[in-house]
């Protein structure tokens, strides 16, 4: 295989804010793997919370570039195991793993969801994310982008007021992501009121390390609780059982589609709901997530919808949430 690396700076339509950070641009690494005239593409975004930069990912991959170029791709799982053995970060592994899956599907002349024995006839629709802002700005964003399902980022001093005001402007279902910002007491106080306001579930309301807090609220909270920062890698899935209703898998954090498929299987065996989320990726990363749709209960794959300009074609999300899968195989990605 021949590996290529390219950095992109993705400009967002709006400043994106959560409880711990804000940004207007998202640095992203796109990896290409070429074999027999076909090229597969994968993506991983930089993340200051996890101390990951595009430069650091490039350095990791370049350190084993010779080995990658000489690797015989039998299947993506073997390639992923090879990358793990080389000690790369999960973010760098994700970009390479997504590229390997896309390439593998293109070589096999099938979309990934078909290679996995699933059908794309039924799938959950993605939410559209509204980042933290002034209440007026958050209302403007909802009005600007009518959507049947919103994820609302919270973690402010007026969280309930925000939801009450947004509810005046839409009948859409709400999901709440507090990004570790609440206490157990806040969660139990807010949850009944939020449920009455049409909230579907709470994502990571408490800090990931607050195990005792999650033990205290899981049976008392009237809303389902989904793990995000508490479920990063495969070993975390079983740890979340009994503390959370479900898990949110991020491909960049766990290391790509290969471990994500195992995490989905494990979570289902534990009777947990399964969601896959995004990290403001372009259509490169979103198209990989879309291949998992038939296996999911929930999905957050609006990353490319939040960008001013996309960098690739692949899966398209129409108004209202319908997904159009590309005719190209693999993940169906082509760089623009």
Image (cartoon, helix red, strand yellow):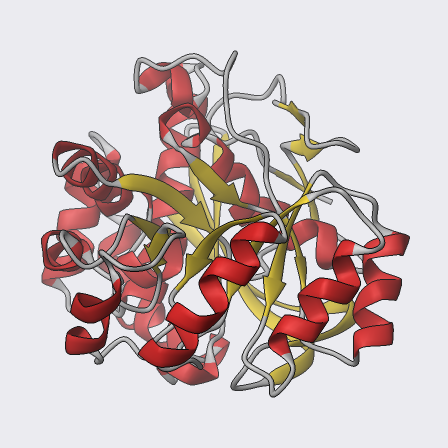
**On screen, residue 258 above or below 140:** above
Residue visible at 57% across and 85% down? 21
Residue 5 in sight: no
- Camera-nearest residue between 203 and 262: 203
Spot occupied by residue 239 in the image (x, y as percentages of width and height): 11, 59
Residue visible at 15% across and 59% down? 236
Residue visible at 52% across and 11% down? 121
- Is 294 displayed left or right of 175 in the figure? left
- Is 243 displayed left or right of 326 in the figure? left
Q: Quadrant of the C terminus?
A: top right
**On screen, residue 13 above or below 25:** above
- Is 250 displayed left or right of 305 in the figure? left
Residue visible at 50% across and 23% down? 123
- Camera-nearest residue between 78 and 126: 126
**On screen, residue 164 above or below 256:** below
Spot occupied by residue 17 in the image (x, y as percentages of width and height): 65, 78
Q: How many marks?
A: 0
The part of the image, by quadrant, that contains residue 23 is bottom right
Q: Quadrant of the N terminus?
A: top left
The part of the image, by quadrant, that contains residue 127 is top right
Spot occupied by residue 318 in the image (x, y as percentages of width and height): 76, 31
Residue 270 in sight: yes
- Camera-nearest residue between 82 and 262: 262
Spot occupied by residue 97 in the image (x, y as percentages of width and height): 33, 47
């Amino acid at each position: 295989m021949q590996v290529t690396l390219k950095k992109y700076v993705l400009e967002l339509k709006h400043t994106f804010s959560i409880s711990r950070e804000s940004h207007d641009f998202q640095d992203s690494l796109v990896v290409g793997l070429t074999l027999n005239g076909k090229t597969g593409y994968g993506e991983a975004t930089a993340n200051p919370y996890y101390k990951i930069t595009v430069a650091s990912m490039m350095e990791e991959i370049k350190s084993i570039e010779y080995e990658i170029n000489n690797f015989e791709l039998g299947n993506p799982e073997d390639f992923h195991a090879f990358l793990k053995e080389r000690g790369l970060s999960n973010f760098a592994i994700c970009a390479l793993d997504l590229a390997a899956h896309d390439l593998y599907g293109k070589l096999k002349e099938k979309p990934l969801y078909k290679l996995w024995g699933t059908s794309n006839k039924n799938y959950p629709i993605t939410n559209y994310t509204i980042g933290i802002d002034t209440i007026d700005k958050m209302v403007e964003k909802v009005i600007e982008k009518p959507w049947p399902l919103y994820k609302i980022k919270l973690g402010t001093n007026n969280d309930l007021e925000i939801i009450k005001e947004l509810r005046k402007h839409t009948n859409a279902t709400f999901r709440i992501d507090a990004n570790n910002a609440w206490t157990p007491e806040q969660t139990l106080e807010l949850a009944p009121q939020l449920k009455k306001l049409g909230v579907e579930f709470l994502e990571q309301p408490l800090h990931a390390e607050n195990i005792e807090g999650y033990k205290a609220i899981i049976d008392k909270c009237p809303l389902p609780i989904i793990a995000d920062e508490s479920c990063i890698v495969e070993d975390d899935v079983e740890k979340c059982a009994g503390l959370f209703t479900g898990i949110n898998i991020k491909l960049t954090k766990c290391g790509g589609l290969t471990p994500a498929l195992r995490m989905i299987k494990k979570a289902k065996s534990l009777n947990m709901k399964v969601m896959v989320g995004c990290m403001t990726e372009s259509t490169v990363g979103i198209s990989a997530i879309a291949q998992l749709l038939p296996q999911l209960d929930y999905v957050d794959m609006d990353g490319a919808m939040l960008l001013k300009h996309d960098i690739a074609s692949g899966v398209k999300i129409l108004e209202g949430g319908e997904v159009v899968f590309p005719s190209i195989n693999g993940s169906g990605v082509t760089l623009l």
